[in-house]
Amino acid sequence: MKNGIKRALITGISGQDGSYLARYLLGNGYEVFGASRDAQAASFTNLSKLGIRDKVKTVSMSLNDFRSVLQALVQIKPTEIYNLAAQSSVSLSFEQPVETMESITIGTLNLLEAMRFLGMPIRFYNAGSSECFGDTGGEPANEATPFRPKSPYAVAKSAAFWEVVNYRDAYDLFACSGILFNHESPLRQKRFVTIKIVNAAYRIAQGSGERLKLGNLDIQRDWGWAEEYVEAMWLMLQKEVPDDYIVATGETHTLKDFVSEVFLNFGLNWEDYVDFDQDLIRPNELLVSKADPIKAYHDLGWQAKYRMKDVARMMTEVIRDDWMNVR
Ligand code: NDP
């Protein structure tokens, strides 16, 4: 802390959560540093869209390279680190398992090791994932539910979660994981299904004449609004004692419901425009994802305000305003 100002380092700043978190922390008086694998080449479009590009200091950091991590921490001297960088796509993780594992498990380990090595009083947030739970037989997962990961991504996130627990227990580091369920926004990468649906429905409403191809429409997820989830990350690091928390709405819906809601927002019936595509079925599909986020409510005072229908509406409203097409 310099002159009482808190200094945050966000890895994966160019992503959806990194950009919203940066805006949130700047609003709370933080000095914000953002790490990208190549800060010179990255365009940081999401930061620009949020109007904060010139307020965030960006640095290059390779999470797989301990020297690079150590150097960044020595230079920046953060009071808080938010580790959001990852190969974050479940489907891509089946095609790039090693890249996924390394970016998540080695990346998290390098940050924890660097914190331990430097002995600086840094508070550490790690981006955990609901994918770690796998299928819970329709039961809502809480913080005590065992992990049964069903993808390379989920395996990596599970390992990183236990790295955090171990470094907290063994070395008394202030380290937490947020086990976040799906959260969406117009800043979501285009490869993710929610933004793909919103973009396609918009183009169809404009008369493109195309058809939207989707995989299993019966999968069930808990969809929240990314902008409010970043507050939960921050709240975890303000507690006296570090701990892990589920962050979710507590409501689960099928993908079919989400598709239907988005198309309705454009005045369309989804059944007239959507085709099933076998190629989009994953080798090992997580069917039902359900959350019990009561601990975050009790301990952090955090509760999701927006649910799936709000998320679908807000995403369609933004694309109608043509804001997303800046990309
Ligand atoms: P994004 O994919 O939008 O952003 C992640 C960032 O990580 C990218 O901008 C990129 O930054 C960096 N990155 C990408 N691939 C790699 C790689 N192979 N090695 C190192 N860095 C990489 O993710 P979100 O903002 O949506 O999510 C933030 C974190 O939360 C991620 O760890 C994700 O797995 C996790 N999460 C997200 C959920 C969601 O619903 N959004 C749910 C649960 C967990 P750059 O190219 O600048 O280096």
Image (cartoon, rainbow, N blue to C red):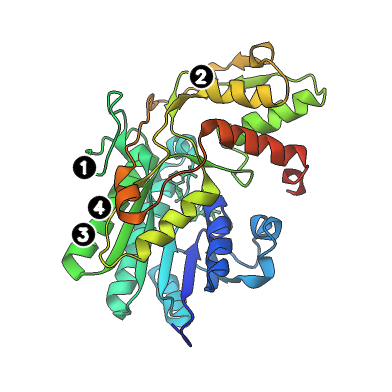
| Residue under numbered circle 4 | 162
| Residue under numbered circle 2 | 217
Q: Amino acid at mark 1?
A: Ala
The answer to whether the beta carbon of the residue marked 4 is less than 8 Å from any atom of ligand 1 is no
Q: Which of the two discs, 4 and 2, labels the residue nearer the N terminus?
A: 4
**Furthest residue to the bottom?**
3
Characterize the local packing of mark 2: few (<14), some (14-19) or many (20 or more) Cα atoms within 10 angstroms: some
**Circle 3 sits in a helix, a strand or a loop, which is it?**
helix
**Cα–Cα gap, marks 1 and 4:** 13 Å
Can residue 190 be seen?
yes
Labels 1 & 4 near each other (Cβ < 8 A): no
* Residue 123 sits above or below residue 95 on the image: below
Label drawn at residue 166: 3
Characterize the local packing of mark 4: few (<14), some (14-19) or many (20 or more) Cα atoms within 10 angstroms: few
Q: Nearer the viewer, residue 86 or 187?
A: 187
**Cα–Cα gap, marks 1 and 2:** 29 Å
| Residue under numbered circle 1 | 144
Labels 3 & 1 near each other (Cβ < 8 A): no
* Residue 281 sits above or below residue 228 on the image: above
Q: Which of the two discs, 1 and 2, labels the residue nearer the N terminus?
A: 1
From the viewer's perspective, is 161 left or right of 18?
A: left
Q: Amino acid at mark 3?
A: Asn
